[in-house]
Amino acid sequence: MNRRKLFYGWVGIFVGLITTTVLALESPSSSSNVEGLENAIVKVANTTGKAVVSISTEHITKIKTPQRFYFNQPFGSGSPFDREDPFRRFFDDFFGETPGGLQEREFKRSGLGSGVIIDADGYILTNEHVVNDADKITVKLPDGRELKGEIKGKDSRSDLAVIKINAKNLPVASLGDSGSLKIGEWVVAIGNPFGFALDNSEPTVTTGVVSALRRSLGRAVSQNRDYSDLIQTDAAINPGNSGGPLVNLKGEVIGINVAIFSTSGGYQGVGFAIPINNAKKILSRLIEGKKIFYGWLGVTVQDMTEDMAKHIGLSEKSGALVVNTLEAGPAQNAGIKEGDVIKKFNGVPIKNVKDLINIVSMSEVSKKAGVLLVRDKKELNLSVLVGERPQEPEKVLEVKEKAVSWRGLKVEDLSSDLSRRFGIKEKKGVVVVDVESNSPADEAGINPGDVILEINKQPISSVLDYKKITTALKGDAMVKILRGYFLIKEKEK
């Protein structure tokens, strides 16, 4: 009897728990949470949405094309042959386009994007790629007004721009703090891609969560833009939404929508936005139309692996490994060498390449910064004068390659990687990394992996020595490598 009572007692408790759970799910507090979320989204749409605009651009390209000679149509205007004159086609087919000189024709390319008003006097923040190369900018406000836009400042690396319209007392979006964002936080993406296509010029609103932080887009996508610190969201960001704001439930702008990741051109659940804190750092300069400067070290770096760290004698794989230094660049001038591991920059720990690029980029140009690095298992403190990042760093590296190319030879300073690759034990000289086919060097019998020690009895210890000697050299040259002497003749002109 006692066992039966105990059994029914436990059943009663279990049923009670289930009933309580069901009631809790159906309770007013649960529905009020849903209503609270809906109300927050509606409020964001009604407030911040009023500051989101549609941006239409027009770029005119002038191209010179052959001018055709046209015959009078024998059947008169409006005949079936108006579109394709048989006499003109006959002459074009047999004689080519009839000479008539060149005529200049204009081709118009249109674009569409979004923007967000950040100042009541008409300053609008958007993406640089939305307004880049635009000859004409038209801004449509949510109230239906269309106004001419003028670029005040733009920066391709950050992909941000500020345009200005002639208007007053405009609704303004509040800028928030993207540094406090958390994964899973609700966000609202607002854009105005259909402002010029539909009669209703109000913006579109989509919702989702922050799905990841500090995302990077690959080089194939970003090219020379810095897409290395993006907010990832599953809120739908469709074409035309670029330049619009990503907003938190307080109605604060925490990002500028920049791109979608798609294999089909449509929305597939992954969108990206530039953190608003990144925009804040350069906003005043954009408004003033000033150039944005980015710091630069003049190095190529790579992330550490556990095996590398163990070999170098580090307890962890954090840091950025220096692969190459640009000749006479900021890093080389400061004494940074290939194979060094940068652990701190201006006192900030460097976990990986991304950390180093971000902090160097935001460092003040022409100011000294402290660098803590590890070389030969020992820590070393250096001071580097931060340089200005060139518009196209790749071309700077190309110049370096041309500077060390001579008579079909391309050489590099000896490094641990190159030594392992070619099995080199020599510590002095420069290593041949490429030999142009049918060049004087190729005809002399020099191969990739050879180490050049002397040229005309002048010792070579670095690429700098090699460049100085070969630049001034005329006539045939006796080159000493590890395999012996070789005569590289001067190429006949």
Image (cartoon, rainbow, N blue to C red):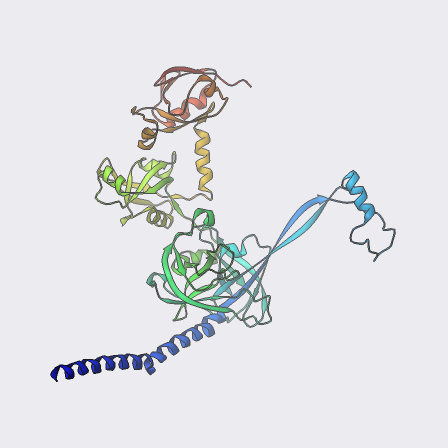
Q: Residue furthest front?
A: 1
Is residue 99 visible in this depiction of the protein? no
Where 444 sits versus 332, above or below? above
> Residue at image x 50%, y 67%?
52
Q: Residue sitting at 41 percent across and 48 percent down? A: 294
Quadrant location, the C terminus: top right
Image check: 6 left or right of 318?
left
Q: Is residue 397 above or below residue 1?
A: above
Name the residue nearer the viewer: 446 or 286: 446
> Residue drawn at (47%, 42%), measured in percent from left and top?
392
Quadrant of the rendered structure where residue 373 is? top left
**x, y (%) of residue 225?**
45, 50
Q: Nearer the viewer, residue 409 or 37?
A: 37
Q: Position of residue 302 (x, y in %)?
A: 34, 42
Q: Quadrant of residue 207?
A: bottom left
**Is residue 441 rendered to the left or right of residue 195?**
left
Q: How many marks?
A: 0
In the image, is 375 to the left or to the right of 435?
A: left
> Measured from the top left, where is residue 411 in percent x and y?
40, 27
Query: What is the x, y in percent for residue 227?
Result: 42, 52
**Quadrant assignment for the N terminus:** bottom left
**Camera-nearest residue between 418 and 167:** 418
| Residue 315 appears in view | yes
Quick one: 143 or 99, which is closer to the camera? 99
